[in-house]
Image (spheres, rainbow, N blue to C red):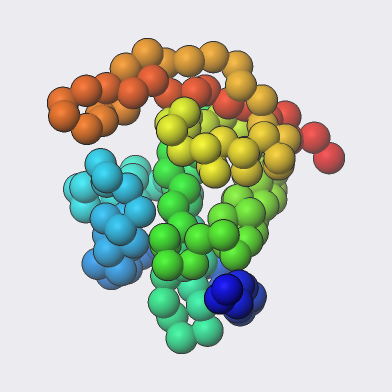
C-alpha cells in the first residue's frame, strides 16, 4: 500500500492588478484551466474597458490564479475566476475569491453575480460554501465538447458588512 501524500500548502501570494504585459502568463493559465478558454482579445478588451482584473502571484511572480470583475452601480459581476490546475485544491481559489469579494465591497458593491458550469462541481461547491446561492439558469450558455452547449448556473451573493 502506498503512502498518501498531501500537496504542500500554498505560499502566501500577492494580489495585484493585471496589466497587458501579463497576458502571456494569464493566457497560459487560462488555456490550462479551461477546455474553452477566453481569448487574448477578450482579456485585452476587459482591461481597456476598465474592468477590475486581478492576479494572484506566488513569491517568484508565477500566476496562481486571477479574476475579472465588472462593476455597475452597486452590483458586481464575476466574469472569470481561474486557478492554475497545478495549484488547485490548495486554497488558492478560496483565497482569491475572498480577496475579490473584499475588493467589490470596497467599490460599493452590495451584490455579486456569476455564472458557472454545472459540470464544474468543485467551483459550484466553493461558491456555495462562500455564500453564493443559485438564482437561475442560462440554457446552452457555454460551449461544450462536440459542438454541444452546456447550461450556466447563475449565482448571487449579498455583500453585507
| Horizontal side of residue 123 vs 24, given as left or right | right
Front residue (pair 95, 44): 95
> The C terminus appears in which quarter of the rendering?
top right
> The N terminus appears in which quarter of the rendering?
bottom right
Would you place residue 3 above or below residue 106 in this image? below
How far across and down, in percent of the image, does residue 74 sit? 63, 30
| Horizontal side of residue 121 vs 100, given as left or right | left
How far across and down, in percent of the image, does residue 75 sit? 60, 29
Would you place residue 116 above or below residue 59 in this image? above
Taking the spot 67% from the left edge, 34% from the top edge, the residue there is 128
Residue 71 visible in the shown view: no
How far across and down, in percent of the image, does residue 105 sit? 69, 43
Farthest bottom residue in view: 60
Farthest left residue in view: 147
Taking the spot 56% from the left edge, 76% from the top edge, the residue there is 2
Would you place residue 63 above or below residue 51 in this image? below
How many marks the image carries: the answer is 0
Farthest front residue in view: 1
Front residue (pair 64, 75): 64
| Horizontal side of residue 99 vs 64, given as left or right | right
Residue 41 visible in the shown view: yes
Front residue (pair 7, 114): 7
Taking the spot 31% from the left edge, 27% from the top edge, the residue there is 142
Q: Quadrant of residue 63?
A: bottom left
Amino acid at each position: 500500500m502506498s503512502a498518501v501524500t498531501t500537496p504542500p500548502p500554498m505560499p502566501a501570494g500577492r494580489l495585484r492588478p493585471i496589466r497587458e504585459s501579463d497576458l502571456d502568463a494569464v493566457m497560459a493559465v487560462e488555456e490550462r484551466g479551461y477546455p474553452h478558454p477566453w481569448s487574448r482579445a477578450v482579456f485585452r478588451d476587459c482591461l481597456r474597458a476598465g474592468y477590475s482584473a486581478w492576479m494572484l502571484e506566488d513569491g517568484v511572480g508565477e500566476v496562481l490564479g486571477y479574476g475579472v470583475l465588472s462593476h455597475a452601480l452597486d452590483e458586481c459581476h464575476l466574469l472569470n475566476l481561474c486557478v492554475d490546475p497545478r495549484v488547485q485544491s490548495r486554497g488558492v481559489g478560496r483565497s482569491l475569491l475572498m480577496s475579490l469579494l473584499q475588493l467589490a465591497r470596497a467599490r460599493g458593491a452590495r451584490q455579486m453575480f456569476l455564472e458557472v458550469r454545472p459540470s464544474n462541481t468543485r467551483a459550484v461547491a466553493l461558491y456555495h460554501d462562500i455564500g453564493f446561492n443559485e438564482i437561475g439558469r442560462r440554457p446552452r450558455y457555454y460551449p461544450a465538447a462536440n459542438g454541444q452547449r452546456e447550461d450556466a448556473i447563475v449565482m448571487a451573493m449579498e455583500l453585507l458588512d
